[in-house]
Structures are given as C-alpha cells and as structure tokens.
Amino acid sequence: MDFETLKVSTRIKSVLVAGGAGFIGSHLVEHLLRQKSIQRVLVVDNFISGTIENLEGSRGDGKLEILEMDITDPGVIDGCEGGFDLVLHLAAIANPKDYERKPVETLRVNSQGSENLVTIAERNMAKFIFFSSSEVYGDQEPALTGSLEEASWSRIILNQKRSPYVVGKCFGEEITKNLCLDKGMDHLIIRPFNIYGPKMDMMTNYGRVIPNFCIWGLNGDPMRIHGDGEQIRSFCYVDDFINALISLLNSGVVGKSINIGNPDPISIIELAGLISDILGVEENFGFVERYPYEPFCRVPDISLIKKLTGWEPEMDLRSGLESTVKWFRETGLERYDRK
C-alpha cells in the first residue's frame, strides 16, 4: 500500500479537521490536500498544542482554510459554514503535563467539543469520526495483558493524574456513539496506539517518549527511563496510520470502534538503545521513578481493521525512527530550542 498513491473516495469533497494543526492532524491535512477530488479542507484549531508551523507546507494551497477557534465555544457551530462531507475530531490536550495542569479543559474538548462537532456534522449530513486513544483501556495488570482488542476490558483508576484525559476520551466515545445513533448519523471511533513521526511535540516531559529520547540524545543528555524500562509498547509510523484511516474511509465501514497501531512490541529500554544507535551516540540512560499508574503493556490487536480493509502497517520501527530522527536533526531541535 503506497501512502503517496492511496486516494480518498471521490464522494468526499469537503472536510473539517478539528485539531488539524497538531501532529497527526497536520499530516492528514497534507494528504487530503493532495487529493484532486477534495475541494476544501477547513482546519479548526485553538493552537494550544498544535502549531501553525505544522501547516507551513500547506498554507499556500488555495483549498486550505484555517479557523483559529476553540471547539468548546458554542460559536464554532455557526463559525464553520459551508457544506462538509466529513468531520474529523482530532482536537485534544494529549500531553500529560498539559492535561494535569488543565483537567477541565481536557474534559471539555471531549465533551462539549464533541457535541459541537457532531452538531456541525448533523447539519451537513456528514460522517463524523472521533479520535479516541489507547488510553481508554486503562491500567492493565501485567499478568493479564496481551494484545488489546476493541472489546477488551478497561481498568481506569480515578482521582489520579491520568484520569482527566482517560475519562475524557471514554466520554467522547460514548457521546459520539449515542448522539450519532440517536440522530441516524454515520460515525467511526478510532483508537490510535502510539503514533510517531516527523512533527511530533518535542516538549520534554513524560508521555512523549520518542521525541524525548531524540532530543536528549541529540543534546548529549541522558535518556531518562521510568522504572526499569521493561514496559512494553508498540509504535506506528504516521504514514501507516494515515493509510489505515483512508482505507477505513474508502471501505464505507461505520458504527464501529477500531484500533489502529503496529502490533510489534518493544520495551522502552530497547527503544532507547535503538534510538541511541540511530543517533550514533553511546547509550546513556538515567533511571527515574516510574510514573504512577503507567500501563505496563500497551499493544493493539489489529485483527478488526485487517478484516475490514486488509490494512497492515508497512513501516518497520528502525526505518520509521530514522525518518523521525532526520526531522529532529533538521527541524525539530531548532523548534525545541525556541520554546
């Protein structure tokens, strides 16, 4: 499956992308703008976490419109004028440091923000897609954790730092499903698992392990590892993720919650070693206390999307990290130094 040639269905001509200035959103916007059949892409973003720099390569395209607005503002409903065939909700406060400081805003973007965007989709008779998170599976016990299926149980621990984001995403899924079913609207719920690639947020704090390791390695600092580093994760390159999304759009599948990720597992300490090797630096690790309630294992079962579309990730982790490291060397480190 070729990311450059995979086409969006010609039925989709106008798209609203909430959170389109973020990491995943801006990659998706670039792909949509390359489609000859798409005539308009409206990005709605308040630029709290997304940046205009992420859209720099697209801003000269006449099909792109940018509306700086918070999706929790009721005015966004009338502010997003014009017909849309597809409304995508990627807006989020997803950085742990940010959602610990702004729990109410984190909840609202998934509650009021989701309801406002569903209203826009309803007015336009558009398909609505809510981007959830693998975090909805919660804090799994190591002995019981395997690959997570869409119907896997969830263990959410309340009254702790992660809960505003997790609870917000769970609520976002439920309000999306129930509002859309009540209104007879087509919808999908996407659960991304650790998407990475160029243009990632490079603020060094827990929850952004790949950019953290890249920045620390490039600056000659120790790569800080929480606990013993034996936590298991899997990482999906952003081009593969966009391919998966487009495959779902073209399939016509609606009314489902779907994992998108790469099922190949790797421990955090192995990841640190791999990035060190790609950077050409000696392994230099600093071990710190493990983050409270951090899931031990987070790996997706992707049987459902394979069955529905035939999609599978193509980018191996080393090649994807080489591309990501190249971006950090050429662009990301400069951005980080300006923050």
Image (spheres, rainbow, N blue to C red):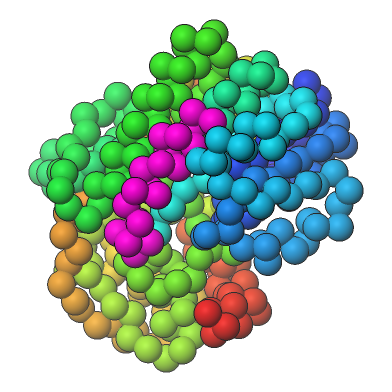
Q: Is residue 216 left or right of residue 228?
A: right
Q: Is residue 289 left or right of residue 20?
A: left
Residue 197: give x, y in percent of width and height: 55, 60
Residue 234: give x, y in percent of width and height: 37, 52
Residue sitting at the far front: 75
- Region rendered in magenta: 97-116
Query: Would you place residue 38 above or below residue 228 in this image?
Result: above
Q: Which residue occupies the foreground of this view, 203 or 210?
A: 203
Residue sitting at the far bottom: 220
The residue at 19%/76% (across/down) is 288
Residue 332: give x, y in percent of width and height: 58, 75
Q: Which residue occupies the foreground of this view, 326 or 14?
A: 14
Residue 6: give x, y in percent of width and height: 73, 37
The residue at 41%/82% (across/down) is 216
Q: Quadrant of the N terminus?
A: top right
Query: Would you place residue 185 above or below residue 333 in this image?
Result: above
Q: In which quarter of the image is residue 171?
A: top left
Q: Quadrant of residue 282?
A: bottom left
| Total count of labels | 0
Residue 181 in sight: yes
Q: Say whether residue 54 is magenta.
A: no
The residue at 34%/40% (across/down) is 168
The residue at 71%/59% (across/down) is 55
Query: Would you place residue 128 above or below residue 137 in this image?
Result: above
